[in-house]
Amino acid sequence: MIVLLMEVSSFGSRGQNIQHASSLKYLYIAIAVLVIALLVLGTVLAYFLVKKGSDKDDGKGSALSEDQIEYSDPDEADSDENDGSSGVEFIEDDRESPDEESDTSNTVVVDLYFYMGPLEVQQSTDNIHKVERRTDKDDIYSYIIESMISGPNEEESTAGYIPVFRLSGLSTCGSVNYEYKIDTGVMKVKLCKDIDLVYDTEDAYAGITLNAQSRVVYSFVNALSIGEVRSVELYGSDGSCYAPDTGHNTCEWGDAY
């Protein structure tokens, strides 16, 4: 009997152990399923978050760090344009800035007088042409004299205008080409170097030099007879009246600058 009770008691203890072990087994299984479910859920959430971020970047364009940005050297801009390589394109703006725009508000128009080439033989001195120029110089008379000495500019020469004299040799006025003074409406101009004439033909004829001198005097008289100037007297490098017998110079033989 005692043996039987011991067997029953032992069997009851084993039954409880088996039941406890079975409960733990199911608990472990439940925990494992929960962990797996959490991992799956986390993976799904991570996938959707990454996908959402990728779609956002596709809409706005991916940002580059400062180290990833490639800068073009300005000196290599031309080569980049030619070979099609990437980089910053430098565009030169050739428009004039407000400070560089040509301002004609402070300029005045002056008239110069030149002859059209080629000269005809014994051409009339009156056959002269007016050419307009602009200047911002305060001393208009100096500008006119300097322009007459320099002769037609490139544009005027292309149009056919020619000089009728040139200065050569040493100056009798220091280092300048001319001097001038105005007294009671009379302007005296001294050309301080030798006056080389331009003749209308290579063949000599009576009066060829006088005609060439007349063109020089007539050019200056027409160009300088403006403003307060009522008459113009032209003098040579020695200070004497230049070609008074041309009929265009208002000074006379014996007059000195």
Image (tube, helix red, strand yellow):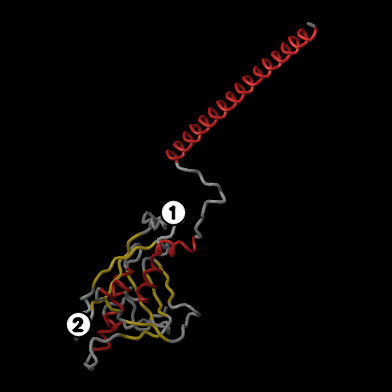
Which image quadrant for residue 82? bottom left
The residue drawn where x is 19% and y is 83% is 120
Q: Nearer the viewer, mark 1 or mark 2?
A: 1
In-image side of 129 versus 12 (left or right): left
Q: In the image, residue 106 lies at what x, y percent?
A: 39, 56
In-image side of 76 versus 200 (left or right): right
Classify mark 2: residues with Cα within 10 Å, few (<14), some (14-19) or many (20+): few
Q: Amino acid at mark 2?
A: Gln
For this rendering, which residue is in front, 240 or 156?
A: 156
Q: In the image, residue 118 lies at what x, y percent?
A: 22, 82
Q: Are marks 1 and 2 in contact (CB under 8 Å)?
A: no
Count of labels shown? Answer: 2
Q: In the image, residue 9 lies at what x, y percent?
A: 75, 10
Please determine whether, in this image, residue 253 is positioned above or below residue 233: below
Q: Amino acid at mark 1?
A: Asp
For this rendering, which residue is in front, 36 or 245?
A: 36
Q: Mark 1 — residue?
A: 99
Q: Give the number of the disc on residue 123.
A: 2
- In the picture, the quarter occupied by the C terminus is bottom left
CA–CA distance between discs 1 and 2? 48 Å
Find numbered disc 2 in the image and state the secondary structure of the residue it sits on. loop
The residue drawn where x is 42% and y is 72% is 180
Q: In the image, residue 37 lies at what x, y percent?
A: 55, 26
Q: Farthest residue toward the right?
A: 2
Q: Give the number of the disc on residue 134.
A: none
Q: Mark 1 vs mark 2: which is more N-terminal?
A: 1
Please determine whether, in this image, residue 243 is positioned above or below residue 86: below
- In the picture, the quarter occupied by the N terminus is top right
